[in-house]
Amino acid sequence: MLEHSGLSKLEREMIAVVVSSINKCFYCLTAHGAAVRQLSGDPKLGEMLVMNWRVADLPHRQRAMLAFAEKMTRNSSEIGEFDREALRDAGFTDRDIWDIANVAGFFNMTNRVASATDMRPNDGYHAQAR
């Protein structure tokens, strides 16, 4: 999440929230929702991404990125070259696509671990950047 990437820190956090929303991971939604609010300066964006990322007023680049992360989370076996080409058309490089896939894959894994172990967020996250 902190390494150099063609994805901004905010974009990586946005992927974390969208994936965690699909997986209903309370810990990650709370913690990474707070990061989205802080990094974007928009207290509504985190909630939009949690509830339905499509209602957020996002540029085409981020919409393509989140659609890919959602498809990877829900139906990874259905991803094909068409999906990667849509990301390229939105301005992502193959390295960026690697990063999107790795962030989405990482949060799909950590969501499951957090849910399985009843990991709870610190109370302070709930009020951050509001």
Image (spheres, grey):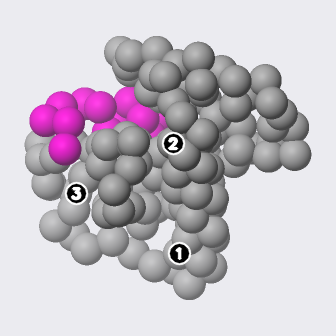
Residue shown at the point (60%, 40%) measured from the top left? 94
Q: Residues within 10 Å of mark 2 (few under 14, many from 20)?
A: some
Q: Residues within 10 Å of mark 1 (few under 14, many from 20)?
A: some
Circle number at residue 96: 2
Q: Is the N terminus in the top left, top right, bottom left or bottom right quadrant?
A: bottom left
C-alpha gap between disc 2 and disc 1: 26 Å
Tell me the kind of residue under disc 3.
His
Which residue position is annotated with label 1?
Answer: 114
- SS for dot 1: helix
- Range drawn in magenta: 39-51
Residue shown at the point (59%, 25%) measured from the top left? 88
Which residue position is annotated with label 3?
Answer: 126
Nearer to the camera, 30 or 84: 84
Nearer to the camera, 64 or 73: 64
> Does residue 109 appear anywhere in the picture?
yes
| Vertical relation: 30 (above or below) 56 | below
Tell me the kind of residue under disc 2.
Asp
